[in-house]
């Protein structure tokens, strides 16, 4: 009986320690007006950004276990709430869902596709920071 209690306590301690040492990654976006849906985690190895004195550009990739149609709806809703104007959506079996937006002369392309385990979202945009002199 005592050994069962000890095993239970040790198991609980290890489980809690694992949770405490591996916190969930916060959802990240280099652009504050481009929200990312909850349940998606940033993939730094697949993403890149470039910043010069006049241009800021990024390709940000996220993945999560989210149904693609609900992700497409949530993405459109949150982007429009942040001032992005929806221009076009295309859907194909081979390439998934492609959404295009614009805001104050900046374009944003959002690609959503399903992998074997995860659903992926790729946000690609470039923004002019100041007019060249």
Image (tube, rainbow, N blue to C red):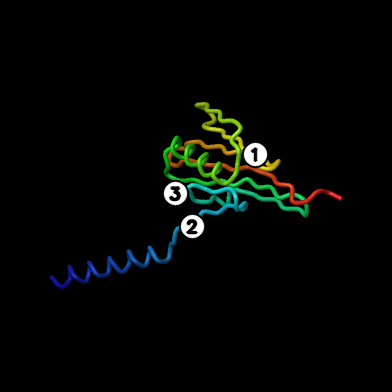
Residue 108 position, x and y percent, is 63, 40
- Relative vertical location of residue 12 with respect to residue 103 in this rendering, above or below: below
Name the residue carrying label 1.
102
Camera-nearest residue between 108 and 60: 108
Name the residue carrying label 2.
25
- Which residue corresponds to the image point at 50% horizontal and 36% vertical from the top-left? 113
Mark 1 crowd level (few <14, some 14–19, many ≥20, 10 Å Cα): some
**Mark 2, mark 1: which one is toward the viewer?**
1
**Mark 3, mark 1: which one is toward the viewer?**
1
Camera-nearest residue between 96 and 133: 133
Q: Secondary structure at mark 2?
A: loop
Camera-nearest residue between 98 and 46: 98
Q: Are marks 2 and 1 in contact (CB under 8 Å)?
A: no
- Real-space CA distance between mark 2 and mark 1, rounded to the nearest whole angstrom: 28 Å
- Which residue corresponds to the image point at 42% horizontal and 66% vertical from the top-left? 21
| Comes first in the chain, label 3 or label 2 | 2
- Which residue corresponds to the image point at 55% horizontal and 54% vertical from the top-left? 28
Residue 126 position, x and y percent, is 69, 45
- Real-space CA distance between mark 3 and mark 1, rounded to the nearest whole angstrom: 25 Å
The image quadrant that residue 100 belongs to is top right
Residue 14 position, x and y percent, is 33, 67
Q: Is residue 130 left or right of residue 61?
A: right
Q: Secondary structure at mark 1?
A: strand
| Comes first in the chain, label 3 or label 1 | 3
- Relative vertical location of residue 79 with respect to residue 89 in this rendering, above or below: below
Q: Is residue 54 left or right of residue 33?
A: right
Name the residue carrying label 3.
39
**Mark 3, mark 2: which one is toward the viewer?**
3
């Amino acid at each position: 009986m005592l050994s069962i209690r000890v095993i239970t306590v040790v198991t609980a301690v290890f489980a809690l320690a694992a949770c405490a040492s591996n916190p969930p990654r916060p959802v990240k976006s280099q652009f504050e007006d481009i929200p990312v849906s909850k349940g998606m985690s940033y993939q730094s190895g697949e993403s890149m950004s470039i910043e010069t004195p006049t241009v800021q550009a990024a390709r940000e990739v996220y993945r999560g276990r989210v149904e693609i149609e609900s992700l497409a709806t949530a993405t459109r809703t949150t982007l429009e709430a942040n001032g992005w104007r929806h221009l076009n959506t295309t859907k194909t079996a081979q390439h998934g869902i492609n959404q295009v937006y614009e805001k104050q002369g900046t374009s944003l392309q959002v690609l959503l596709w399903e992998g074997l385990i995860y659903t992926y979202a790729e946000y690609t945009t470039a923004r002019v920071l100041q007019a060249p002199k």
